[in-house]
Image: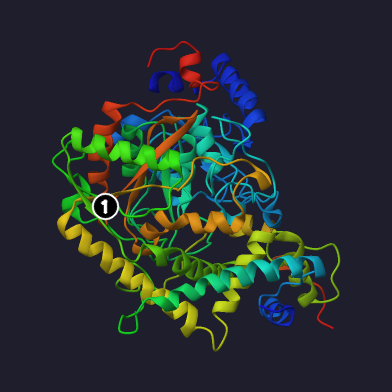
């Protein structure tokens, strides 16, 4: 994978790469993508895809309001709070 | 063994001795990122969800370690990442709550490859972990800290997580038992997500009895995990006593093992026949496609799961950002290590428009082929036997295996994750001063077959402990 394509992918992944990092990652990503080409050797065209090995149905629970005992504790873990709102930089 | 740990946890001098002994060993080995045996010693079980069972009786009063990507209320939950350094969990994973209820006590959080991504625990951003058999070598990974904590006698058992071999491979490298349960048998609630369709919480322990007892306690359907699956009723209490009436299929052919591992594997297979098992050689034609399919799917799922680390609600936030976009990018640039960035990039790439069919969809079809391959084998054998890893514990750093070589070496472990079936790594001897191991696989929810076979081997040759680190309960002179 060339550096340009790597940066395009990094952009999608919300990653910023330094030049040194990009060089090292480009090599490592290319090595893996080349290796993935091995998957073309096996004929699986007629097989259905497996998304989960054992799940046969989606599990849901009733859409009902419940009290959470950890809501406050989770909020406390935000880097910056104002009342019960998480603060982030202004959108300019 | 049990009575000593119970004594230790009642407090007083014994507890101090225990703490000091673990801390001494931890300075040499780096198993724990955080260790505090008093924090949970006095806590009251949350719910009496487990009581009176033989398994609960077996683990009551025992201290245990928890991989630091599994939530334990009041302890750190760093995933060995700068992104979550200093983060403390406000709640406990379902598996931990069930152990609480059974009377076991978490005493610390163990080191791992960042977010579970690695095979040597060398991708931790927070600490170095060493193999107790030879400290110049790696512990395996990603549950390396948990494996070392058990192997070096610091705790009798530990929880780990296994996405492509992350319990079994470090268990093999450190000479302990490592169980990756059937997918969905143990709730993932409280396990920090990496590759959701492949991973699960499992057990590392010093003997088969304890491995099984802990598994029985943490196994449960859980409404907090949409992918949890109830074990079929008729298999819940299936006989797991030692027995040789099992048909074992032994993976043959050119396996690409190094000489020492190949010799050890051959010797153990011969021993299976001598012990009375019905042994047949089998082949798994899809095996060579496991690793590319596994890394395609794992990276794709990782790229989605790790999108949540954006510096907003929790985790690392850069000191300065002009706007939200810069905030997100700054957090991810500073917070993630190279291996995590690699897998996010790979995952993003294989999911890009135009590439999905070539990579992700193809990997999912290969996953179907692997499941069929195993299902076919399990029609004629009860248990499948194969190596865990092609080499013994390797040296730290550049003298060891490269990151790419480590990935290729996941070929024996990733199959069980792709198929969702249970697998157990068990110690089968020591060669050149390092442990040798074997892996057994069974059909979904047939963990009892793994225990039946493992017990026979355990009786024949009980696992050895590293010469420098005899179990602390023996050192303290308290009879088991």
**One can see residue A82 in this view:** no
Q: Is residue B133 above or below residue B351?
A: above
- Image location (x, y in percent) of residue B65: 51, 37
> Does B340 sit left or right of B98 as displayed?
right
Q: Closest to the observer: B353 or B59?
A: B353
To which chain does the residue with label 1 belong? B
Q: Closest to the observer: B303 or A40?
A: A40
Q: Quadrant of residue B361?
A: bottom left
- Image location (x, y in percent) of residue B102: 37, 37
Q: Quadrant of residue B171?
A: top left
Q: Secondary structure at mark 1?
A: loop
Q: Closest to the observer: B54 or B39?
A: B54
> Does B369 sit left or right of B164 as displayed?
left
Q: Which residue of the protein is positioned furthest toward the bottom in this rendering?
A: B354
- Image location (x, y in percent) of residue A54: 31, 66
The residue that disc 1 covers is B442
Residue under the point 52% across and 50% down: B70
**One can see residue B356 in this view:** yes
């Amino acid at each position: 994978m060339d550096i340009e394509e790597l940066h395009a992918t990094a952009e999608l992944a919300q990653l910023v790469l330094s030049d040194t990092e990009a060089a090292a990652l480009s090599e490592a990503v290319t090595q893996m993508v080349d290796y993935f080409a091995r998957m073309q050797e096996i004929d699986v065209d007629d097989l259905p895809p497996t998304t989960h090995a054992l799940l046969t149905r989606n599990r849901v629970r009733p859409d009902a309001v419940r009290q959470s005992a950890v809501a406050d504790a989770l909020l406390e873990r935000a880097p910056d709070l104002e009342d019960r709102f998480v603060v982030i930089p202004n959108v300019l | 063994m049990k009575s000593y740990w119970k004594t230790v946890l009642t407090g007083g001098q014994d507890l101090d001795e225990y703490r000091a002994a673990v801390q001494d060993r931890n300075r040499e080995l780096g198993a724990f990122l955080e260790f505090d045996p008093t924090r949970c010693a006095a806590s009251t079980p949350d719910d009496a969800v487990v009581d009176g069972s033989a398994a609960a009786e077996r683990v009551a009063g025992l201290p245990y370690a928890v991989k630091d990507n599994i939530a334990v209320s009041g302890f750190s939950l760093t995933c060995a990442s700068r992104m979550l350094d200093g983060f403390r969990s406000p709640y406990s994973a379902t598996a931990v709550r069930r152990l609480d209820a059974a009377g076991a006590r978490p005493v610390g959080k163990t080191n791992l490859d960042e977010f579970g991504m690695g095979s040597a625990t060398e991708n931790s951003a927070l600490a170095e972990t060493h193999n107790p058999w030879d400290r110049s070598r790696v512990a395996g990974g990603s549950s390396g800290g948990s494996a070392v904590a058990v192997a070096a006698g610091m705790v009798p058992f530990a929880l780990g997580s296994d996405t492509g071999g992350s319990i079994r491979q470090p268990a093999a490298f450190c000479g302990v038992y490592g169980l990756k349960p059937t997918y969905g048998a143990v709730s993932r609630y409280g396990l920090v997500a990496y590759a959701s369709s492949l991973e699960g919480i499992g057990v590392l322990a010093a003997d088969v009895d304890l491995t099984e007892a802990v598994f029985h306690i943490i196994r449960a359907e859980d409404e907090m995990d949409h992918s949890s699956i109830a074990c079929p009723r008729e298999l819940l209490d299936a006989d797991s006593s030692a027995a040789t009436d099992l048909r074992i299929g032994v993976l043959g052919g050119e396996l690409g093992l190094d000489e020492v591992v190949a010799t050890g594997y051959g010797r153990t297979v011969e021993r299976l026949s001598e012990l009375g098992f019905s042994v047949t050689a089998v082949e798994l034609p899809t095996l060579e496609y496991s690793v590319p399919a596994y890394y395609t799917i794992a990276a794709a799922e990782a790229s989605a799961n790790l999108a949540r680390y954006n510096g907003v609600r929790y985790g690392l936030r850069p000191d300065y950002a002009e706007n939200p976009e810069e905030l997100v990018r700054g957090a991810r640039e500073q917070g993630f290590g190279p291996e995590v960035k690699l897998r996010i990039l790979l995952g993003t790439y294989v999911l890009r428009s135009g590439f999905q069919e070539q990579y992700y969809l193809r990997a999912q079809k290969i996953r179907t082929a692997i499941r069929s391959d195993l299902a076919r084998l399990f029609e004629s054998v009860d248990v499948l036997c194969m190596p865990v890893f092609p080499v013994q514990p390797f040296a730290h750093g550049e003298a060891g295996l490269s990151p790419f070589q480590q990935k290729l070496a996941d070929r024996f472990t990733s199959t069980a994750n792709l198929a969702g079936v249970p697998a157990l790594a068990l110690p089968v001897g020591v060669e050149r001063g390092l442990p040798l191991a074997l892996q057994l696989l069974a059909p979904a929810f047939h963990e009892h077959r793994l225990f039946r076979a493992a017990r026979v081997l355990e009786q024949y040759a009980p696992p050895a402990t590293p010469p420098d680190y005899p179990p602390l309960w023996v050192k303290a002179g308290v009879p088991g």
